[in-house]
Amino acid sequence: MTKIVLADNLEYLKTLPDGYVSLIYIDPPFNTQKIQKRNLVKATLSESGLVGFGGNKYAREIVGEYGSYNDTFDNYILFIKERIVEAHRILKPNGSIYLHIDYREAHYVKIMMDEIFGRDNFINEIIWSYEWGAKSKTKWSSKHDTILF
């Protein structure tokens, strides 16, 4: 069965039975302490612009906004932990979970996941490296996210 659900994942997870799924991928807010906006972007082939799919260059045009949220949490670990506990409950014994996170919380979330799943069940840390984003003149620029497996 394939199903896409638009909901607060904590409330939806609570409706699912134990041992229900084989694979979970979670891409939560990152606790950036900023308002996150998602723009609708139109990309067209261009002589100049960002290099993208197929090595082609693309010009990007923002054509609207489809949402925003306040990515600020008083207790981020509790926010994530409630969801990971439910994810653990619905995961089959031989299932896998991937959690996408950035440098702000990765080390805390890794320890919390070790407590829930058991340290011996940690398989690996996948580094998602990227080139886009600002290049800071005052600090090391963040150019990767972490996916805990």
Image: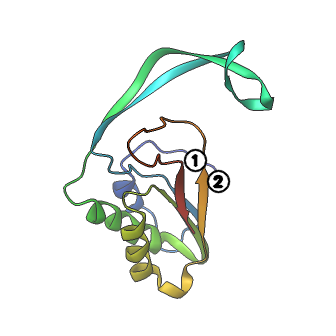
From the viewer's side, name the closer residue of 108 and 66. 108
Q: Quadrant of residue 49?
A: top right
Name the colouring of the figure. Answer: rainbow
Graded by Cα atoms within 10 Å as few (under 14), some (14 to 19) or many (20 or more), the crowding at tag 1 reads: few
**In the rendered image, which residue does mark 2 sit on?**
1
Front residue (pair 3, 118): 118
- Residue 148, x across and y down, in percent: 53, 66
Which is nearer the eye, 57 or 67?
Answer: 57
Tag 1 residue: 3
Q: CA distance from mark 2 to mark 1?
A: 6 Å
Q: Position of residue 79 (x, y in %)?
A: 29, 60
Residue projecting furthest to the front: 137
Q: How many marks?
A: 2
| Image quarter of residue 24 | bottom right
Nearest the viewer among 121 and 102 is 102
Identified by mark 1, the residue type is: Lys
Question: What residue is rendered at 32% in x and 51% in y?
Answer: 31
Q: Where, quadrant-wise, is the C terminus in this rendering?
A: bottom right
Residue shown at 47%/46% (left/top)?
Answer: 141
Q: Position of residue 68 (x, y in %)?
A: 34, 31
Asked whether the residues under the numbered discs 2 and 1 touch, taking CB atoms below 8 Å apart as contact, a structural biologist would say: yes
Q: Reply above or below: 38 against 122.
A: above
